Image (cartoon, rainbow, N blue to C red):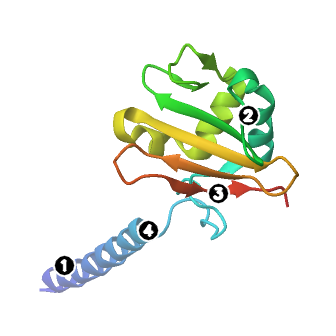
Amino acid sequence: MGGIGNARVGCRELKLILGVLLTGALAACNAPAGPEATSSVSLLPDEPHLEQGSLEELFGSAGAYLQISGELEVVAFRCTIVEGAFCWFGARTQDGPVAGDLARRVIDQIGPQAIENANHNEVAVQCYRPTSGGDPYCVIDWGWGAGWEALPISRPT
């Protein structure tokens, strides 16, 4: 009779041990893995914009595509992401290519995903700056018939 009683005590201990192990395993599965994320890191892309330095380079490299309209200098260009990523001045891609490094920075600032989501994977941009000095501004057309929208210019802080 002593053997059966000891067997029951052994089963209870085994059930208790298994319960503790199972609870520990479930708690470990629910714990976050790796370091905690900081609130200052965002995985979302930046809003479409142009940096002031890139805009100055666009005005400086536009050459014959730089237009003067009244008191404004105007530079118009297009960017696309189709079989590569590039930007150009003028009506056709071969008219006035924007230098590769500058084009890549402009595409990164506008946002490659945003350009891919534009009509025909292409955006049109027009930027204006007063000939007498002052703040430039840009507009962008995503090609969906909604017209031109403001394209913010980020200035150095």
Cβ–Cβ under 8 Å for marks 2 and 1: no
In the rendered view, tell whether residue 154 sits above or below residue 19: above
**Considering depth in this image, is 99 or 63 the residue closer to the camera?**
63
- Amino acid type at image mark 1: Ala
Q: Which numbered circle lies on residue 7?
A: 1
Residue type at the position of mark 3: Pro
Query: Which one is earlier in the sequence, the residue at label 2 or at label 3?
Result: 2
Q: Is residue 123 left or right of residue 9?
A: right
Q: Which residue is mark 3?
A: 152
Q: Find numbered disc 2 in the image and state the secondary structure of the residue it sits on.
A: helix
Residue 7 versus residue 74 in the image, above or below:
below
Residue 92 spot, x, y in % from top left: 50, 19
Q: Nearer the viewer, mark 2 or mark 4?
A: 2
- Secondary structure beneath label 4: helix
The alpha-carbon separation of the residues under discs 2 and 4 comes to: 54 Å
Q: Nearer the viewer, mark 3 or mark 1?
A: 3
* Residue 61 visible in this rendered orientation of the protein: yes
> In the structure shown, which secondary structural element does the residue marked by tag 1 occupy?
helix
How far is disc 3 from disc 1 in space, using C-alphas?
77 Å
- Between the residue at mark 4 and the residue at mark 3, the CA separation in whole angstroms equals 46 Å
Residue sitting at x 83%, y 46%? 131
Image quadrant for the C terminus? Answer: bottom right
Please tell me which of labels 4 and 3 falls first in the chain.
Answer: 4
Q: Disc 4 or 1, which lies upstream in sequence?
A: 1
Residue at x 27%, y 75% (from the top left corner): 14
Residue in front for this viewpoint, 61 or 20? 61
Q: Residue at x 71, y 26 (%)?
A: 101
The residue tagged 4 is 28
Residue type highlighted by circle 4? Ala
The residues tagged by marks 2 and 1 sit, at their Cα atoms, a distance apart of 85 Å
Q: Which residue is mark 2?
A: 58
